[in-house]
Amino acid sequence: MNLTRSTFLRSGLAGAALLAAPGILRAQPKVIRFATEAAFPPFNQSTPSGQIVGFEPDLVAALSERAGFEYELIAQAWDGMIQGLIDGKYDAVVDAVTITPKRLEVIDFSLPYTTGGSTFLTMNEAGLTLEGNGTQVDLEDTAATEAAVAGIADALDGKVVAVQVATIQSDFLETYIAPLGATIRTYQSGQDAFQDLTNGRADLMMSSVTNLTAFLKKNPESISMNGPIFTGGIMGRGAAIAVRKGDTERQALFDTALKAMSDDGSLAEMSAKWFGINVSPKL
């Protein structure tokens, strides 16, 4: 298989007693190939030894045990990952992919496994303060959105905002922030965007709150989340496992196991372990 930088085969437990547990599908063991970026902590990242670790690898392992399938984690660049799914290069994508109306036109999703919004990250030494810091703003509330954007307009005029390419955050920035006079600079990975922020080549970085916690954890004294937290609308309604359009078998497999994890609290525990807070939805 020439699709991957690194590939890991893990075996889900498929014993009869396990498959008979409440809320678990009685699926026959099968190998499901999951694409992930392996560079988007704490959702997923690659260790020096090449192992893919993080919230989503742990999640897939738990799903495999509950639903009785074997799985493969395939490291793929984010740009083109959805198209690779559509083309059949793998069976599912687990890479903090947010459910949006635009994506639902071409792919389907499982139930969501995280909620949360997106905000900005700034270097403390820059002294940049955005109005409405920490305030939740639903983009489907037009009045609230207009007020929030107006509140940060002056601070963002002439600034450079770093963001990963082909993300909901880049769509948001082009729609709401570029007209304010800000320059939107895209990068192939969130790590590259963060590097330019810390090197002074960008004034702000935008990403999901769940992703930004990883950078904050490593740099608590030098960086901070800054500005409103935007949800809904372009920002979608939570991250979920992406499958090909019409793949109802795998969709149902994931939904049943995710619902069981939500009901017994294990999804919340896994969320708290990797993000420091519970960002799991009640399914």
Image: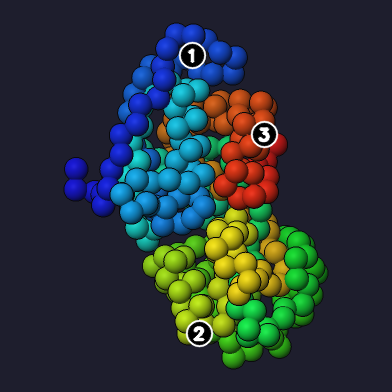
Query: Tag 2: residue type?
Result: Gly
The residue tagged 3 is 283
Query: Tag 3: residue type?
Result: Leu
Q: Position of residue 127 (x, y in %)?
A: 68, 85
| SS of the residue under disc 2 | loop
Q: Which mark is residue 157?
A: none
| SS of the residue under disc 3 | loop
Q: Residue at x 57, y 31 (%)?
A: 258
Q: Is residue 15 above or below residue 215?
A: above
Residue 56 visible in rendering: yes
The residue tagged 1 is 19
Q: Is residue 169 above or below residue 94?
A: below
Please give left or right for residue 282 compared with residue 249 in the image. right
Query: Tag 1: residue type?
Result: Leu
Q: Position of residue 143 (x, y in %)?
A: 80, 69
Contact? badges 2 and 1 (CB < 8 Å)? no
Q: Is residue 125 above or below residue 236?
A: below
Among the two numbered marks 2 and 1 on one chain, the one whose residue lies closer to the N terminus: 1
Q: Residue 265's image quarter?
A: top right
Mark 2 crowd level (few <14, some 14–19, many ≥20, 10 Å Cα): few
- Distance between mark 2 and mark 1 Cα atoms: 53 Å
Among the two numbered marks 3 and 2 on one chain, the one whose residue lies closer to the N terminus: 2
Q: Position of residue 5 (x, y in %)?
A: 26, 52
Q: Residue at x 60, y 64 (%)?
A: 216
Please give left or right for residue 261 compared with residue 130 in the image. left
Q: Which mark is residue 200?
A: 2
Please give left or right for residue 229 compared with residue 9 in the image. right
